[in-house]
Image (cartoon, rainbow, N blue to C red):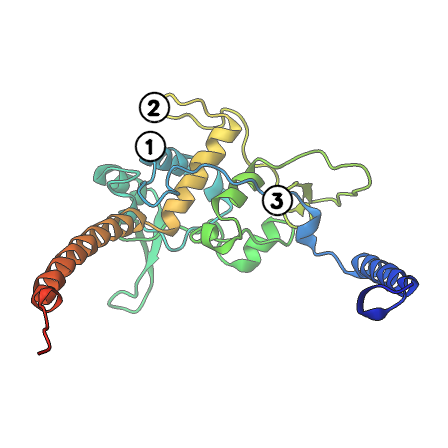
Amino acid sequence: MTSFFGLPSFVIRGLTLSGVVGATWLARCTPLNASELVAHPPHLPWSHKPFYSSFDYASVRRGFIVYKNVCANCHSMTSLAYRHLIGTCLTEEEAKALAAEATVEDGPDDEGNTFERPGRVTDFLPKPYANLKAAQFANNGAAPPDLSLIIKAREGGPDYVFSVLTGYREPPAGIVVREGLHYNAYFPGGLIAMAQALANDIVEYEDGTPANISQMAKDVTTFLAWASEPEHDDRKLMGIKVLGLTFLALLASLYVKRFKWSVLKTRRIKFF
């Protein structure tokens, strides 16, 4: 008895069984990446995601409060200056007062010496540690990353950052957490050096919003998203304007085309 291509049916069955066994063997021998052993962050409905939407600036202001009171103790934002916060997170007077609280090393003076002065709005936000070694020493060898572009630097962007901030759990059975590490369901590998930084009511929002963990994680993630792309709203507004003008130009081009070609397209040619 024969089957496809004139081959006997038992040969076809043998080839099929060999293919199944080979695929199973390859699947079992394929190494797993660390990212496959953790939960993947869900896609969250961020208000600034649609192309026609802007940032929720009330959330951005609340997120700056969380960063200033919680995250800034370990994480720097070297690309953000006090002047960038004016009109978004702070008024000009508030930005000047906040900058004046910092001590900035400046110089050299006329004699070539450095000196310390109060901060100005043109200064960048201060670093929590003097250098990389100091950051590593204070955090069990793991230097906290700079948060200026953390949304752009991590796959998943705001979804990932929010999930990590809220993803601390008790380790499942069989996972041993070494001293100095913590289990986080969304961090690659599952073990993270950063302890859970957020707790209910550790900050107080001026607008009366409840400061629970998920709300603070959402607000600080929105602030970090804005800080990584402060031109976000201007870019979208410009894009909408360009699309509108392009549409009008297209209509005008179609009208001119029909007007210019109407004589040729409506003429009658007779052969005698």
Q: Earlier in the sequence, mark 2 or mark 3?
A: 3
Residue 186 or residue 192, whichever sits in front: 186
- For the residues labelled 3 and 1, the Cα–Cα distance comes to 28 Å
Q: Classify mark 3: helix, strand or loop.
A: loop
- For the residues labelled 1 and 2, the Cα–Cα distance comes to 9 Å
Q: Are marks 1 and 2 in contact (CB under 8 Å)?
A: yes
Rendering coords of residue 35 (x, y %):
66, 52
Instruction: Note whether 199 is above or below 268 in the view shown.
Output: above
Instruction: Note whether 170 is above or below 75 in the view shown.
Output: above
Instruction: Find disc 3 in the rendering and name its residue.
Output: 40
Residue at 57%, 35% (x, y): give it: 166
Q: Is residue 63 left or right of residue 18?
A: left
Instruction: Find disc 1 in the rendering and name its residue.
Output: 58
Mark 2 crowd level (few <14, some 14–19, many ≥20, 10 Å Cα): few
Residue 45 or residue 61, whichever sits in front: 45
Residue at 46%, 35% (x, y): give it: 218
Q: Classify mark 1: helix, strand or loop.
A: helix
Label at residue 101: none
Q: Is residue 31 left or right of residue 155?
A: right
Instruction: Find disc 2 in the rendering and name its residue.
Output: 207
Q: For residue 197, which quarter of the picture?
A: top right
Q: Are marks 2 and 3 in contact (CB under 8 Å)?
A: no
The residue mark sitting in front, 3 or 1, is 3
- For the residues labelled 2 and 3, the Cα–Cα distance comes to 33 Å
